[in-house]
Image (tube, rainbow, N blue to C red):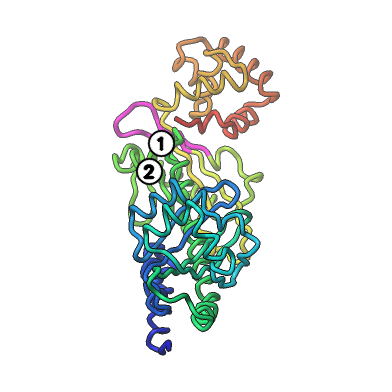
Amino acid sequence: MTSASDLTQLTNLLLGATCDPKQWSMVIEKLARLHGANKGGLEFSDLGSGRTVIQADYGLGPAFRARYAQQFGPSNPFASKRTAFLLGRVVDAAKVIPPGTLHKTAFYREFLRPHGIEHMLCAVLFQERDLHGFLNLTRSKGMRPFSPREAALLQSLIPALQATLLVNRRLNRHAQEQKQNADLLDRFQRGVVLLDPRGKAVSINRYAWTILEGRDGLRLEKNGIQAVQPEENRRFKRLLRAAVSGADPKEMSLEDRLMLVTRTYSETPLSIFVAPLTNESPFPRESPARAVVFICDPDRCASGATDALRELYGFTKAEARLALCLLGGLSLEECAPRLGITLNTVRTQIKRLFLKTSTSRQGDLIRVLLESPATLHME
């Protein structure tokens, strides 16, 4: 008979497994002991492809899991009996495939019997299209079959097990999405910093960390990102305040979003672009990121972005160099000596840039280029 102490222990284990998938093995061990089973496992099987993975187990071990996934999972005869396994229902495997029939299969002779598995209680805890999450408790041949009372006990625990697994999978999916987003940002050849409503950094990609840790024009302090030069820092702070204030991006001029920052270790300034992020939450402070800061080191961005601009818009190499110079915040007069050409040549080239980007003003040209994937090209 299950005691209150047993249920309390199981509840505590389920709470732990909610946030830590590794603790599912302890949950399964507790369930096995409650039901007099000597083995158990939490298995995820794609019944369409045959791919299967044992996420956690008790009494099975790594060798069993590997062999099952590689060889026997896809040939499991119970996979063809999917209609017998209903979501949230405990099933005695002997009622799905009678022992006499099961014993004739290679799956039983070459896998179940050598691992001492004869009697099985199964339950589908999770189902999403062909993906099924099975809980299995097993006994060896020398032990008696599971009784209806033991099946009923497991059935009474199914809702709690399902709730834990559902939360566990959602948290895991969220963690995977966060990791993928972080990996994606780290691949940008541009610094990316996400700011909260107070202007403090909530996410910094690898490129930006390199600049901030080196205090190369920008630095990270307790109260947020700062420009190293005091005068530039005052303007930089104004840009950040405007971005996190919830202002409409359409009403912000380029001057409100773009600036150059003097470098500590290079004569080429950093190009900074600050933009607000859409916030649809009715409670503004619930949104962790309110604005984004893009940081470009022209010395590092130039080569890849030049190729991308030429591919996207058909720019010549010289035109792409001018486009990047303008993105760096320089005027036409400043671009000419930087590129080693005359001002007339610059004016001729920018007319061709207008034509190839379907723009007619310098501000529109820069907006198109800033929104282009060429300026956020990936390694």
Q: Residue at x 41, y 67 (%)?
A: 40
Give the SS element for disc 2: strand
Is residue 41 in view from this perspective?
yes
Q: How many marks?
A: 2
Q: Position of residue 14 (x, y in %)?
A: 43, 73
The residues tagged by marks 1 and 2 sit, at their Cα atoms, a distance apart of 7 Å
Give the SS element for disc 1: strand
Q: Residue at x 54, y 78 (%)?
A: 155
Q: Residues within 10 Å of mark 1 (few under 14, many from 20)?
A: many
Q: Position of residue 15 (x, y in %)?
A: 42, 74
Q: In the rendered structure, which segment of residues is drawn in magenta? A: 258-272
Q: Is residue 64 left or right of residue 318?
A: left
As rendered, which of 142 and 265 lies closer to the eye?
Answer: 142
Circle on res. 261: 1
Q: Earlier in the sequence, mark 1 or mark 2?
A: 2
Vertical side of 85 occupied by 1: above or below: below
Vertical side of 379 occupied by 140: above or below: below
